[in-house]
Image (cartoon, coloured by chain):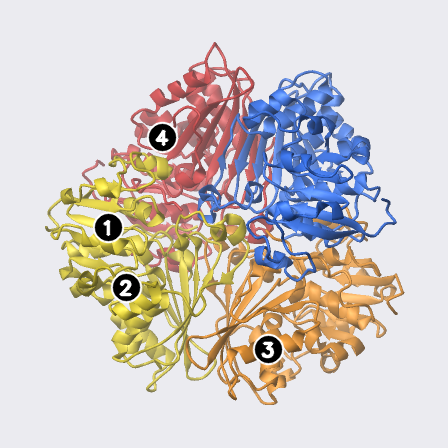
Chain colours: A yellow, B red, C blue, D orange
């Protein structure tokens, strides 16, 4: 399959959630793919427009039950199913399919860590070994060769993009990393939960999952890999009244004589030429609204007035770079297409 | 200039407002245009990223003062300047330029009506005569031949798209049209006004410009043209806490034996094949969030339980179909390009 | 029971919903009542703070199941239960209790109308006859003597307060009343429904229940009573992204030579001295945010530019004057207390 | 002046801003005060209802220019004027007046620090010495005797309430305090600034004033006082789309063998009996929406999964406990009234 092929057949398992809808939105602009399969259990038999009216005008297959899905008529599968059920579904897919999994099921390499945080033994340990953890910019070569990519979580993407290069460079103290993150509500998905009601979320903010959020071990896995030794971080997510966006404010202690300017320089070099990551001038800070709807990441570095410390702020759209956009980026890499294909829409502001 | 030309040079006068930014967002995806000029008086000499950080990564010319603008190096001008100042600016442009004006300056054909509603005599009456009022679907052939298109207002676009065909068909009583419209805040522009502050707008709604909004005569002009006799309407806009979107709820009395189903049928036929207008099944109603960021218009028709009446609801994104998207659509028509060029992005939800 | 009694024992059935919480918020400021009973089935056995943390600091009884509720230890019952189940609960209450019912169960006097709109025969027709429909300002004397008050719906309160006096005065055409209403999300209650999620509601607006909302017959009942003959109205509600507030824009045709100024005058006279209803100067329009959190109603009258028509805009906080505030106002009237007791908090803006 | 006096005459200088309006909202419920003076330069000669329609029904004096204000007819002055101009105004007030100043002018005891952060020498250094910095719970006895209280900033109130007792107890490392704060937009005041527009703030979040916000030295002053030696902190504020509320997430390193439970215990003891401060059970976190509109502070302590660290989250309504509510609380203390007078309204949710 190459960039010249104009008919990569794509299946989306779990098309009735927000990441499913976002995949459709992005792939509708993709010149080399064709959506040939959409599953959605509760809405099986219905057109996508019944579930997502904004997509109703597109020419798309009717939703099917997952057990009726003709997956072998696909070349690539995006799996946007809930955590836990995904691993068995993917284990059952034909071997020749390329798969990008947006769930958490294949993100943690360590099976014990998985069991500890998800409360049960992994059901597809062999696949877990094979899966490539795909923050594209940090794992490009592996992604290109992968058959199964574990698409990273939204918070972990926002946190690791700035922190991994700094840990690799030895410029920050890996034992003193605090990540205060703020997310929009779409990260909670489309499930009808009291805590996600407009009335419960608007006009307010609160922390949740403090010291217990499942994205913590995912971030730690990435930083541990970069450091070459076990790392723990403070990760404190907050829920705030906006649809899209994650802002991650990382508080770090400088190491080995590095300055905030050095950190900024390391990141600027690391991401020079990357189409989706932009490092701001030293002292400038990014806003989530400036990446809304796009696959962009913005990173700002500011010197702390506490000497020997710096503040690193990164922003993404959680549904795009934090989910479906990165999934398309990974698919592009896996199929030999330019990574920016279908992802070149500018952010939408206001 | 034809579709084969890949270098339509575009100038945007007034690039530091929201419609200017939205033109840039859309044109960044346009394969046949190149932005060669951006003006912005207060920000002259600065890159667009200083004014709109979300566009800072694009390769664009630095902002210039309008008096320094090399307009003769452009093929098409989008004019996104404030009402009143625009007419003289456009009058001063070289004759060979195609112009899409997003201000209100050339929308009202009748010079007396203009003077009455805008408080001064028109400064370029000859141009006013030449200008084509460009709701693309309703004036396509004229737009194609036009040199100067007056891009319609946001409310008038939302109101006229459903009502003009029904007036033409004689299916509604033209003396009993009530238009209750609800708009997001971006319609007020980027000017720093107390009334547009977050704290003054969020968590509330109010009507404004009741019986005195300048979009009333614009709507009436369109309906008058369709009816062949003078029409007045009730037009009552409301400001509500969202960035983008207009929902127009029109209350109409049926005429000549028509039913709500007949109205729906008239609209469905009129807009069959139109890429940007979709008429919903009878009884279904549209939501602004289902057109967000797109050039789409959705129209729903519902039978009133008052006999002999119907309710017609239409939605657009005020910055796209209500401003910059329709402007690009008009430019495409004026330059012989497919109208959908650069406008095929699906709506963004949530 | 008189104003001198400082220990009216109050029970709230259904305290885990928003109107229940709002009753507690208001009654916490009431010098002559004591909350002695709170029921909440799913949260039975828990303190109110588990359900509504913002009320956790108050000294309140633990939530009980409704079947365990010691209602005979109460003097007044507020019933904030779902429609349909309420009528049997109230039928089972001891006869000496005064009851304010916030559900729709006792609002419609006509049992056929009830059956038509609610899909089943009424289960307590005798009580239905006894119940007083309590827009306090419009039914004060009956409320004072009532044992059971049907607390009006939020939309009907906002619509009837301005329209009933005008219908009574014969100043508007009763066959041409259009009510375009906009509501915040708390009107949908606290049930976990997809349509009430933050992501589904924020940044958008849509109409719902067009020509089929159950508040239509309730409004019609009030206007029919005022007119002395059967009236139908257009009632079109819209859901918009705010927590609290209803804005009702009524489009009316003037009758019997009345002008908009006459309408305004009729309302100003009718509500002179009323502590909770304020009629604005002719041409001024109200905003929901100016009544937020209060029991206030603001009414504005504007002359339409269509001759012979006027626009009447009214605003309330749907949880206060549209539900719990009016319920407390009714209780005050029923127990001989000044109506403003516990309701004198100014609106909260911003 | 004692609690028995029912006519404390209150003047509000700067009544046309949000803190001024909030003072009016709260004092309208105060049984022992009477507002006898309101100033507002741009709106001089107008009733308050022209500036704040939600307060238009109250019986209040017309706004006057500050130079025309009859301050000697007041007993207490609330000064809600902009920073910088306040010091001279207060210096010019008669000596017998009690003054609560809501600006930053008298908050910093150290004149050099003031000059460094505010860019000019202090104009009333003698008053600066006299002023009592009034977080009521932390300075009650001094406030009671004060003639001039410097009402604390919103962020400093939220940060110091939990941190001062912990620093005093020696339970946290004073050299490693990181305060990540999130604020609603009303903190920016009512000035018409582009950055406060609905369109610029909604649907997003960004940090601002990183390492340079003027509330940093104010927080440091309080912690320095508690520690007995110079302290610096990281203070990183973020602006988010809500009207009211501040959430402060403090990341601290435990000291002297203390555990997170010990911290929680210290705070619970320190604030036992305080009507406006509530310490949640260990591990529970507060939400800003649960204090909205009230003078409450909620504090939660959570053990970090990083050993030896804890997370302390506090919330206030920035306009109430962070401004006008605490000002009234201070006035109550200064005049011998119960501190809760006029401040007993429960929070408003949703």
Discs 2/4, front? 2
Assess disc 3: are there few (<14), some (14-19) or many (≥20) residues with their C-alpha within 10 Å of its C-alpha.
Answer: some
Using the rendered image of the protein, determine whether residue A277 is visible from the camera's viewpoint.
Answer: yes
Pointer 1 residue: A78
Chain under numbered label 1: A
Q: Secondary structure at mark 1?
A: strand
Q: Nearer the viewer, residue D187 or D269?
A: D269
**Residue appearing at x 36%, y 26% in the figure:** B139
Pointer 2 residue: A121
**Residue appearing at x 25%, y 68% in the figure:** A111
Q: Secondary structure at mark 4?
A: strand
Q: Which residue in the rendered view is the most extreme toward the top? A: B256
What's the distance in space between the residues labelled 2 and 1, CA to CA? 24 Å
Q: Quadrant of residue B43?
A: bottom left
**D1 sits left or right of A173 in the view:** right
Q: Above or below — where is D122 with respect to C191?
A: below
Residues at marks 2 and 4, common chain? Answer: no
Q: Which mark is residue D265?
A: 3
Q: Secondary structure at mark 3?
A: helix
Residues at marks 2 and 1, common chain? Answer: yes
What's the distance in space between the residues labelled 4 and 1, CA to CA? 31 Å
Q: Nearer the viewer, residue C98 or B167?
A: C98
Pointer 4 residue: B277
Assess disc 4: are there few (<14), some (14-19) or many (≥20) residues with their C-alpha within 10 Å of its C-alpha.
Answer: many
Discs 2/1, front? 2
């Amino acid at each position: 399959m190459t960039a010249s092929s104009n008919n990569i057949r794509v299946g989306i398992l779990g098309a009735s959630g927000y990441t499913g809808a976002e995949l459709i939105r992005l792939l509708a602009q993709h010149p080399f793919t064709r959506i040939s399969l959409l599953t959605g259990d509760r809405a099986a038999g219905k057109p996508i427009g019944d579930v997502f009216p904004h997509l109703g005008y597109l020419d798309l297959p009717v939703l099917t039950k997952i057990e009726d899905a003709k997956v072998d008529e696909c070349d690539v599968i995006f799996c946007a199913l809930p955590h836990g059920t995904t691993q068995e579904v993917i284990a059952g897919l034909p071997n020749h399919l390329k798969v990008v999994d947006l769930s958490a099921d294949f993100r943690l390499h360590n099976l014990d860590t998985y069991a500890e945080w998800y409360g049960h033994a992994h059901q597809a340990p062999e696949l877990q070994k094979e899966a490539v953890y795909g923050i594209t910019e940090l794992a490009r070569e592996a992604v290109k060769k992968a058959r199964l990519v574990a698409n990273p979580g939204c918070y972990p993407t926002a946190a690791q993009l700035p922190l991994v290069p700094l840990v690799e460079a030895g410029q920050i103290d890996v034992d003193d990393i605090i990540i205060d993150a703020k997310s929009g509500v779409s990260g909670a998905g489309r499930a009808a939960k009291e805590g996600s009601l407009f009335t419960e979320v608007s006009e307010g903010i609160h922390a949740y999952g403090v010291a217990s959020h499942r994205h913590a071990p995912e971030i730690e896995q990435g930083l541990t890999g970069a450091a070459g030794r076990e790392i723990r971080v403070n990760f404190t997510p907050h829920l705030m009244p906006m649809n899209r966006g994650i802002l991650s404010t990382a508080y770090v202690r400088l190491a080995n004589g590095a300055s905030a300017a050095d950190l900024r320089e390391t990141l600027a070099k690391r991401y020079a030429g990357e189409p989706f990551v932009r490092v701001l001038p030293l002292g400038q800070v990014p806003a989530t609204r400036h990446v809304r709807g796009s696959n962009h990441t913005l990173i700002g570095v500011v010197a702390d007035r506490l000497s020997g410390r710096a503040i690193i702020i990164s922003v993404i759209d959680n549904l795009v770079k934090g989910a479906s956009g990165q999934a398309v980026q990974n698919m592009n890499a896996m199929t030999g297409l330019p990574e920016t294909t279908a992802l070149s829409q500018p952010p939408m502001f206001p």
